[in-house]
Amino acid sequence: KAGVTQTPRYLIKTRGQQVTLSCSPISGHRSVSWYQQTPGQGLQFLFEYFSETQRNKGNFPGRFSGRQFSNSRSEMNVSTLELGDSALYLCASSLAGRGLAPNNEQFFGPGTRLTVL
Amino acid sequence: SQKIEQNSEALNIQEGKTATLTCNYTNYSPAYLQWYRQDPGRGPVFLLLIRENEKEKRKERLKVTFDTTLKQSLFHITASQPADSATYLCALANTGNQFYFGTGTSLTVIP
């Protein structure tokens, strides 16, 4: 089975621009979560989509948004980029199902490294 | 809000010894806790899950304990090897599938 893929792997943008990141989950996985990882804050939860609906949301401003398509692929958008948005953005997919999967294991992609200048 | 702390940012141990990593949390009652391993430039990889009603879980050289009274999980790697060097993350979740991660502990196993 192919793993979680994320595109692009690296991205450089300037302040004020917007960016769209893409994530393709493992085949059969309906849950896709997005995380922001920075050295100071660690892995912070952005949001989770399940069957095209946002099911959970973290404490990020409205500039961060996402969506999920019928094939479970997901996109994340950040508008009006700020320097502090520079981070590794990770996508993770899982079978869940609220608490249904035996391990509720999340499978992470390699991430998109976003640099805002 | 919930807070998750992992012991010392970095831990160095000698090959063959047991590494013990700590995850403490406050203001949260997780349904389960997971441990992940992350290598540089890669996404985290799932290692173990332990539920709130379980005290201990083992998988090969790995052992996890979970004390909901102390609000603490311990992660042990026995007979550590240089290949175990990585950053280890704990993650707490409720049945709603929303995860909260600690900042991680960087483990270096010295040959």
Image (cartoon, helix red, strand yellow):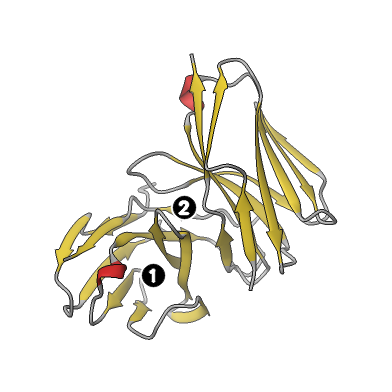
| For residue A67, side relative to residue B18 (left or right) | left
Name which residue lies at 23% across and 82% down: A80
Which residue is found at the position 64% from the left and 68% from the top? B2
Q: Chain of mark 2?
A: A
- Number of numbered discs overlaid on the protein picture: 2
Task: Tell me what residue is drawn at x 47 percent, y 64 percent.
Answer: A44
**Which picture quadrant has residue A8?**
bottom left
Question: Which x, y percent locates residue B26?
Answer: 71, 63
Q: Chain of mark 1?
A: A
Q: In this rendering, is residue A10 above or below B64? A: below
Mark 1 vs mark 2, CA separation in Å? 14 Å
Query: Does dot 1 land on a helix, a strand or a loop?
Result: loop
Which residue is situated farthest in the bottom direction here?
Answer: A62
Q: Residues within 10 Å of mark 2 (few under 14, many from 20)?
A: many
Picture quarter with the N terminus of chain B: bottom right
Name the kind of residue labelled 2 in the image.
Phe
- Residue A4 is drawn in which quadrant? bottom left
**Circle number at residue A107:** 2
Q: Secondary structure at mark 2?
A: strand
Residue B65 placed where, x, y %?
76, 42
Indicate the quadrant where residue B55 lies. top right
Horizontal and vertical percent position of residue A6: 29, 58
Query: Which numbered disc, 1 or 2, marks the residue closer to the eye?
Result: 2
**Can see residue A62?**
yes
What residue does disc 1 label?
A: A72
- Give residue B67's position: percent from left, percent from top: 81, 50
Q: Earlier in the sequence, mark 1 or mark 2?
A: 1
Q: Amino acid at mark 1?
A: Ser
- Residues B12 and A6: in front is B12
Residue placed at 47% from the left, 81% from the top? A54
